[in-house]
Amino acid sequence: MLNNAGCLGKYANLVGLMHPQKVAEIVAHLSKTKGYLCNHQIPLVSVIGATTNGDLVEIGCWYGRTTKAFCLVPNNDLRVHCVDTFLGSKEHQKELQGYKFKDDFINNTKDLPQICSIIEKESAIAAEDFADDTFDVVWIDAGHDYENVKTDITKWLPKLKNGGLMIGHDYP
């Protein structure tokens, strides 16, 4: 016979996370952070963060909305590495007019203990800093054009552990 408490373990808090009232509270909390992670995606991203036992790399962090969603459920086994130039991708250049949003990202995520590193580099260059088989999760959400996405997949796929999860935002 399985012990219910032992069986649920760290996943017990996910049941509460999926409750509609809790989802509404989380969405309201994250609505204060600029970003493109849709409200209906927040619970899924939170579950990914809550169940990752190891390193997660977020390629393209914008203002930290997705980063915060990854870290909503406390998980001492999660280490998040945030890779961004903080200059925006091509489709945001006109809107940003050279504005660098790194300070906004830091301010929005300063209370998240899971962030262990902020890597201010182009994605392909940052990938060179990591050994193959490093990450449990690779989240791709930087440049959205075909060539940038292809480069991100090509450069980061070897960094993914066997059995890991590579996922992209804004597809198709």
Image (tube, rainbow, N blue to C red):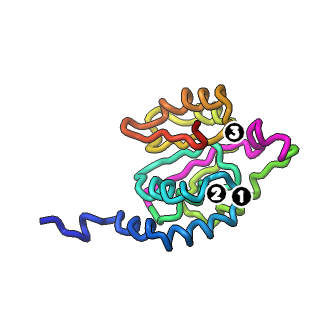
Q: Is residue 81 magenta?
A: yes
Q: Nearer the viewer, residue 81 or 147?
A: 147
Left or right, residue 101 beside residue 139: right
Element carrying mark 2 = helix
Q: Are marks 2 and 1 in contact (CB under 8 Å)?
A: yes
Q: CA distance from mark 3 to mark 1?
A: 21 Å
Amino acid type at circle 3 is: Lys
Q: Is residue 99 magenta?
A: no
Q: Nearer the viewer, mark 2 or mark 3?
A: 2
Element carrying mark 1 = loop
Find residue 25 and name its label. none
Q: Are marks 2 and 3 in contact (CB under 8 Å)?
A: no
Which of the marked residues, 2 or 3, is nearer the chain's N terminus? 2
Q: Which residue sits at x=47%, y=65%?
A: 74
Question: Picture quarter containing residue 32?
Answer: bottom right
Question: What residue does disc 2 label?
Answer: 65
Question: What residue does disc 1 label?
Answer: 34
Q: Nearer the viewer, residue 28 or 126?
A: 28
Question: What residue does disc 3 label?
Answer: 121
Amino acid type at circle 1 is: Lys
Q: Which residue sits at x=24%, y=64%?
A: 7
Q: Is the N terminus in the top left, top right, bottom left or bottom right quadrant? A: bottom left
Residue 73 percent location from the top left of the image: 48, 65
Q: Nearer the viewer, residue 100 or 145?
A: 145
Q: Nearer the viewer, residue 88 or 127?
A: 88
Circle 1 packing at 10 Å, graded few (<14), some (14-19), many (20+), is: some
Task: Give the magenta-colored segment's residue range.
Answer: 76-95
